[in-house]
Amino acid sequence: MANASDTTATPGAPRGKPPPKPDARAEARSADSRAESAPAKAAAPAAPARSVRLRGGFDVATLVGLSAAAAVILIAITSGGSLRAFVDPPSLMIVLGGTLAVTTASFSLGDVAVAWKNAAAVLVHQTLDPKGVARQVLLLAEAARRAGPETLKNVLPELRAEPFLHRSVTLITEGLPPDVMERMLTGEVEASAGGHGKSAGVLRRASEVAPAMGLIGTLVGLVQMLGSLNDPSAIGPAMALALLTTFYGAVLGNVVLAPLAAKVERAAEDDALVKTLYTIGAVSIARQENPRRLEMLLNAVLPPGKRIQYFDREAPRVGA
């Protein structure tokens, strides 16, 4: 009598040996590995660090302030006389040349050249918005936390417009220890702030020297006037030299150089704030800290009006 199992056997298959069953453990491990790899790929955004818009362009406050001051002075001059009467080359030579010479003697040629370069740059001062910088840092931190710091290599080409941030992210991807990175970036911030501070000091010194050179020109003009009392035709030019040098010195020092020095200091503060935010973010990412803690660290540095609430209001929610 044939067994029941013989009637259901597959033709050509060995009798009494069922087909091999798949390894359940191997399939489970394969499914787990696929499940782990899928979120990692999805968590690596193509551009986690969108560029931050520049604030500024032409510094409207500086241009408007200087233009308004010049307009007021010109109106006062032309309303009571001729503009030509206020043009005296010897007086300009004493004030401009003397101010430049004394300022250079107080510092160095290189310091003075850099100071004038920075003074010209504040007229077209461009700075990064601190709130935008903080958001950018948090985007980088979220991308690094989800897919690892190595994923930031993909966004390095997008950060070339911001050299300090590019260097910071490069140090992260190279695996530099966080403490060493913090010392390097902090030292760079301090060096940059020191350079801007020296430029502001040069301009401050020039703003102090200009009125003094005007006073010296006044004394020169008075001496010439007193020495030519017997020649009435020489009294007028000597009096013009005496008065115009004081006028030029006061205008140059208080209307031009002092505001430029204040603007250079302000630009240095803005630059230091942005670089400090980037430093805090880079060190936090290197230490693999929670981005929420990074948000608190950034808000501790930001001014009250610039603080952000990224995770409470701006961050995308899962399932939204």
Image (spheres, rainbow, N blue to C red):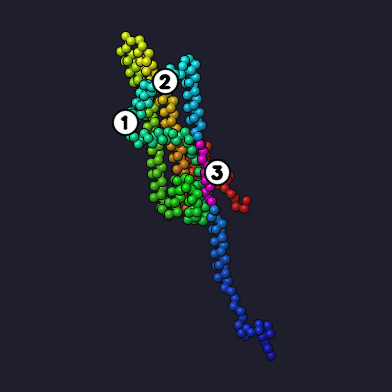
Q: Where is residue 85 in the image (x, y as percent from the top left)?
A: 43, 17
Mark 3 or 1 closer to N-term? 1
Q: Residue 57 location, x and y as percent?
A: 51, 36
- Neighbours of disc 2 within 10 Å: few (<14), some (14-19), many (20+): some
Q: Residue furthest left?
A: 227
* Position of 40 relative to 141 (above/below): below
State which mark lies toward you, 3 or 2: 2
Between 125 and 13, which is closer to the camera in this rendering?
A: 125
Does residue 243 show up magenta in the picture?
no
**What's the CA distance linking mark 1 and mark 2?**
28 Å
Q: What residue is shown with label 1?
A: 105
Kind of residue sitting beneath label 3: Gln
Label 2 amino acid? Answer: Val
Q: Residue at x 42, y 20 (%)?
A: 87
Residue at disc 2, secondary structure:
loop
Q: Which mark is residue 228?
A: none
Q: Residue 87 carries which label?
A: 2
Residue 276 locus on image (x, y percent): 44, 43
Q: What stretch is highlighted in magenta?
A: 47-57
Q: In the drawing, does residue 267 fall left or right of residue 320?
A: left
Which quadrant is the N terminus positioned in? bottom right
Is the residue under label 2 in contact with that under label 3 (CB below 8 Å)?
A: no
Against 250, is 273 above or below? below
Distance of label 3 from label 1 (alpha carbons): 50 Å
Residue position for label 3:
309
Give how far across and how far down residue 269 sits, in percent: 44, 37
Q: In which quarter of the image is residue 261?
A: top left
- Kindly report the distance in space between the C-alpha atoms of the residues bearing marks 3 and 2: 57 Å
